Amino acid sequence: MADLPDAAACYELLARMALIRRFEEEAGRQYQRARAGGFLHLAIGEEATIVGTASVMREEDYLIGTYRTHGHAIARGTDPKRVMAELFGRVDGTSGGRGGSMHIFDRERRFMGGYGIVGGNLPIAAGLALSAEYKGEDAVTVCMFGDGASNAGNFGETMNLAALWALPVLFLVENNLYGMGTSIERHSAQTDLSKKAEGYGIPGQRIDGMDVLAVREAVAEGIRLAREERRPTILEAFTYRYRGHSAADPEVYRERDEVEEWREKDPIETFARRCAEEGVLGEREVNEVREKAEQQVLAAVEFAEASPEPPLDSLYENLYVLGGDAGWYAVDERSPEPHRGEREDRAMPDAARELAEAGAAYAGQPSNSPRPNPAEEGDAQLGTEPEVAGEAEDREVSEEPEDQEVER
Ligand SMILES: Cc1ncc(C[n+]2csc(CCOP(=O)(O)OP(=O)(O)O)c2C)c(N)n1
Ligand SMILES: [Mg+2]
């Protein structure tokens, strides 16, 4: 077990984790109140992986993540007020209110997003690392993504180029055991994700993502390898999200007991307890950390509420369209039947099966006539969002796809 750093460093680690936890709880509440719009993916439970990583990065280093990255931006130093304003769709948000929860971005702090496309951030990370190499900079890129993303085609393409071109990049898999409602045993042929490094001749290591110090130590070494030896690494951090995949997740794929077991390893509680036991932080400091987090988050909500919505005449700013045939198309193809080797006939809970059947029935509707385009129907003015890949999938998890309002 890694030794505790000095009191100031322990205080900072605890404060960041507590702030992110409180921020995300509040984001969930504001989503229920329909103040935060779009989709919302919370990383409650994953704070040690996020904070441990960011804590050993230099200012010049790049961090890039997925759609579950409110905490990543805050860990990088982005003001929680601007993150909350982004969730509220307001002009003072990190993306001017245009991106929402999945697209937090802060170029100044070199937090490069925020991507709704699973695995979409991987090649971009290689590009960031290549640009640093090209410009002769010392910056290292840290790329964080989910266990599910490690199956994407561009995972292999990115790893190959990163290894081949000796790019200064560290890949960190946030293995929370699920890709949406699909457990790792059902989505990855190789469940030891650190072994995926072997095929590219780069180091791979598994770490305890619930232990902020273990994450710090391994990430610091991975960053050193990238910076000094131009060697990419894959780290697989075991972590867990206590909440559903997104706010619209009935969670039929896991048992309550499993969530409770992980809560007992809570990264914030265990770290606070250890700091107290070893006499590095007193009860006063631990309470102070919580109170400060509370105040910062309430101030963030107040700020977001007071920030105006983008003016209507700015609707077409920052947009580009290729060609004239813009439109949205969805492809729904799924079967409720078990796939060979999955043994779902035995292991699949009834509720999960009913859900799959409902999905298949939904997809089986006649699709030879084009799906309505919300822009053409005029719904766009009413605030209906166009569907992008991530959102379409999210909605399938909900038993009643149209009822997103009810889920909030
Ligand atoms: C290319 C692509 N395919 C499918 C989706 C739908 N989708 C959104 S999140 C997700 C699961 C990803 O799981 P994982 O990589 O483990 O990340 P986690 O959500 O657990 O953090 C899927 C399949 C998407 N957004 N993009
Ligand atoms: Mg996952």
Image (tube, rainbow, N blue to C red):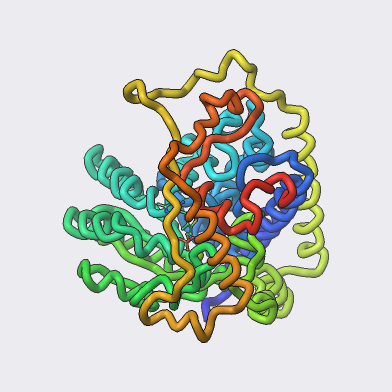
On screen, residue 93 above or below 56: above
Expressed as whole percent of the image width and height from the top left, the position of residue 389 reads 46, 46
The structure residue drawn at horizontal position 45% and vertical position 83%, both measured from the top left corner, is 343
The structure residue drawn at horizontal position 48% and vertical position 69%, both measured from the top left corner, is 336
Residue 7 in sight from this viewpoint: no
In front of the other: 249 or 10: 249
Q: Quadrant of residue 259?
A: bottom right
Expressed as whole percent of the image width and height from the top left, the position of residue 109 reads 50, 40
Decide if residue 283 is on the left or right side of residue 401. right
In the displayed orientation, state which residue is furthest to the left. 164
In the displayed orientation, state which residue is furthest to the bottom. 346
The structure residue drawn at horizontal position 59% and vertical position 79%, both measured from the top left corner, is 349
In front of the other: 235 or 381: 381
Decide if residue 171 is on the left or right side of residue 304. left
Residue 408 in sight from this viewpoint: yes
Expressed as whole percent of the image width and height from the top left, the position of residue 333 reads 42, 56
The structure residue drawn at horizontal position 54% and vertical position 55%, both measured from the top left corner, is 362
Decide if residue 34 is on the left or right side of residue 184. right
Decide if residue 150 is on the left or right side of residue 255. left
Total of numbered circles in the picture? 0
Q: Quadrant of residue 285?
A: bottom right
Q: Quadrant of residue 278?
A: bottom right
In front of the other: 33 or 19: 33
In the displayed orientation, state which residue is furthest to the top. 313
Expressed as whole percent of the image width and height from the top left, the position of residue 227 reads 31, 55
On screen, residue 245 above or below 191: above
